[in-house]
Amino acid sequence: MLPLVATLIVVSLVVAVLAPLAAFAVAGRRFWASVGTEAPAGLLQRHGLEAGDTLGVQRAMARGRRAESDRLRPAVVEWARTTLEATAEQERRHPRRRAVALGLTLLGGVALVFAVLLALTDGGAGAGFWLVVVLSLGLLVNLVLLPRLVRRNLGRAVELNA
């Protein structure tokens, strides 16, 4: 029983440390950090908006809500659609990232299961357990929750402002 527990500890720690690092590199972190931060060229001019209106457009788009002003709504729709198209293009240009992200997501789930098994067989949840849980949850948030949340909010912004 002791070699099994030791093996589970080593595997869990390796997965918990390396998987989030790989997820950070694979998930297009630079891309997701820049989603919706720069308005498409000429957006303000096309819709007759001023530079001060950018924040209202960006806020409605990022939160997936209806813009406060009627004159901002067409700009919200255009910017959100442009961003959705950019995310689709990013996924199309890098098809292996999706496969690697799926593998890392499964790895994060396995690490969580290992951590729970360790906690049950070892008689408690020590520091290693919490390390694995925190790192695995971070991995799952970066690869699953963040991209879905961004896409959902962009889609809602288009629907509510169209």
Image (cartoon, helix red, strand yellow):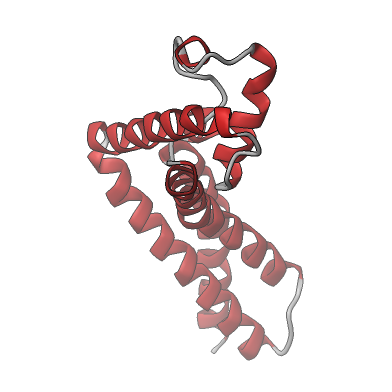
Question: On screen, 23 above or below 59?
Answer: below
Observer-nearest residue: 87 or 126? 87
| Quadrant location, the N terminus | bottom right
Q: Position of residue 107 (x, y in %)?
A: 43, 63
Q: Residue at x 49, y 48 (%)?
A: 160
Q: Taking the image as drawn, is residue 14 in sight?
A: no
Q: Residue at x 58, y 70 (%)?
A: 9
Residue 54 shown left or right of residue 107 in the figure: right
Question: On screen, 15 above or below 80?
Answer: below
Q: Position of residue 64 (x, y in %)?
A: 55, 47
Residue 30 shown left or right of residue 26 in the figure: right
Q: Residue at x 34, y 57 (%)?
A: 103
Q: Position of residue 155 (x, y in %)?
A: 42, 47
Q: Residue at x 60, y 45 (%)?
A: 63
Question: On screen, 125 above or below 49?
Answer: below
Q: Position of residue 105 (x, y in %)?
A: 42, 60
| Quadrant location, the C terminus | top left
Observer-nearest residue: 63 or 162? 162
Q: What number of labels is visible?
A: 0
Observer-nearest residue: 140 or 90? 90
Question: On screen, 142 above or below 77?
Answer: below
Q: Taking the image as drawn, is residue 155 in sight?
A: yes
